[in-house]
Image: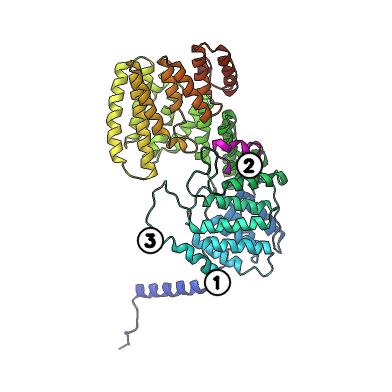
Amino acid sequence: MKNTAFRLRPVAASVAVLALLTSCASLLPFMPDPNARAPVLHGYGQIHIPITTSSPRAQELFNQGVLQAYAFNEVEAVRIFKAALAQDSGCAMCAWGVAWQLGPNINNSDRDNNAEALQYVGYALKRLDHATPRERALVESLALRYGHSSVARETAPLMADMCGKGAQDEDDEKAHPLDVAYAQRMRTLADRYPQDADILSLYAEAEIISTEGPVMWQKSGQPVGRIGEVADRLERALALHPDHTGLNHYLIHVADALPVASRAVAAADKLGRLAPQSPHLVHMPAHTFVHVGRYAEAARVNERALEADATLAATEKAQDFSVSKDWRGHNTHFLWYAALMAGREDAALTAARAMALRAAAAKNIMGEYVRSLPLITLVRMENWEAALAEPQAPGDKGLAKAWMEYAHGIAQVRLGRMDEARQSLAHLQEVAATTRKANDGKSGMHRNVRSMLDMAQSGLEAEVALADKRFDDAEKLQAQAMAASVKVDAREPPLLADGTRVALGGLQARAGRWPQAEATYRQALAEHPGSGWALRGLATSLSAQGKAAEAAAVRAELSKSWSEASPNLRDRV
């Protein structure tokens, strides 16, 4: 009889072998993919950053990887840096590039790829024998950013602050302590290399990521944290490196606020020309343009950005690569907002329908907002008959029905169909109450839903009150609608297209309260310089008060702001 005491069953044996292999694999040194490759992409700018490498091709790919990083295509940048490392396995900076782009960025500060990033940091640290002091400093800075074991003594006290903390409210954004430490380290390097445009770009990125919360400038123009210092440094560097895509791009981000947007106008005017095939860099000037009243240009750059999106996807597919990044959602949404502000109904409605189509399969409640954009657009463009003909967007979570009742109710009031308007209001009040209860959580999505419901309900109640000649009630209700829209319109682009203050001015004007309407429209212009909607209302309110000269001057501004506006809007001026 055979001794079976130590025989394992087949399944158990397989598990044991797998465990043994896994254990052995974990002991093997990490090695990057020697067959990594990347597509050839042109039109992202020009750059040359000398690195320690024996391969001219690795140097060329490294340069391309940095350009993709400055264009916020992290997926493509990682692909290119890995291809560079395949050309020269001893290239520490190529491994640094992979680790850099696997980490937190301005649009996503999560650390989901931290484990892989640490592998590449460790790989780079072991290949610094022939590195320059600059390269060594950059690799060691990333070691700090990711909490590599080589800097455990530095990172342990920082990480101790994270222990025991539960989930935070979405509005209570705290920067990760390692992001803060990394920003400080990059600030030191920026001081050490004051003429180095790329180190300054890295510092700017790090400081933006580590600045707590979504706001970098107070309404007074005072910077948050060290953002003011970063803006100053970027401006000085651009005087020396005017065509650097990283410097121009980060200045637009740093100055992406009304009080300081003018500081980025020169960068916005040139960035798209520097990188004409980058969907994101072609789009980015729109962030500045909408702050300075150049809405028509903001719409045009997003139209070009969408063309670049299509070109990028086609180019990657033609070279047998997967599509790395899809900016169409954000670029189309921004086009929608800019076209609305420019008074371009056809462009805004086309963008709204494209957004709705992209969100056709979205299951969450905010998908109902996106699918309702055509209705929202038609109401904003004062196309009442078309708004009434537009059906409810698909969705059973309540928000789609709320938007339909709001849009139809506003149109019915404006067409004098008050019985129908009151019925729409009753339906809106009912669905809003039910949907609020179903979305009473603290998440950003739930808060956005409640804000939209509050805006829609108060806005339609205000219109009905005005029709009933309850003027005080109408003003109060529209003020409530305006307050409800503040947070959702603080997004980029504004989710409700900044229309509630202009609507308040319109209510005051229709009530014959011309001085109040004038004040409201002037405030709207302070918040949105060059807004054709506000200029149109201001011109009307000035004329009604006999201020003919002022009204004429405002109409001259309006003719520039709405030079591309739809005829039905221009005819009402």
Which image quadrant: the N terminus? bottom left
The three-letter code of the residue at mark 1 reads Pro
Which quarter of the picture shows residue 472? top left
The three-letter code of the residue at mark 2 reads Gln
Q: Position of residue 258 (x, y in %)?
A: 55, 35
The three-letter code of the residue at mark 3 reads Gly
Going from N to C along the chain, the mark reached first, 1 or 2, is 1
Residue under numbered circle 3: 164
| Most foreground residue, 370 or 418 | 418
Q: Is residue 445 left or right of residue 557?
A: left
Q: Is residue 391 visible?
A: no
Q: Is residue 53 left or right of residue 445?
A: right
The residue positioned 27% from the left and 35% from the top of the image is: 434
Q: Is residue 226 left or right of residue 501?
A: right
Q: Position of residue 373 (x, y in %)?
A: 43, 31
- Other residues around mark 1 within 10 Å, as few (<14) / some (14–19) / many (≥20): few
Q: Are marks 2 and 3 in contact (CB under 8 Å)?
A: no
Going from N to C along the chain, the mark reached first, 3 or 1, is 1
The residues colored magenta run 254-271
User: Magenta stretch: residue 262 in it?
Assistant: yes
Residue under numbered circle 1: 29
Element under disc 1 = loop
Q: Are marks 3 and 1 in contact (CB under 8 Å)?
A: no
The scheme the figure's colours follow is rainbow
| Most foreground residue, 58 or 145 | 145
Element under disc 3 = loop
Residue under numbered circle 2: 277
Which quarter of the picture shows residue 419? top left
Q: How many marks?
A: 3
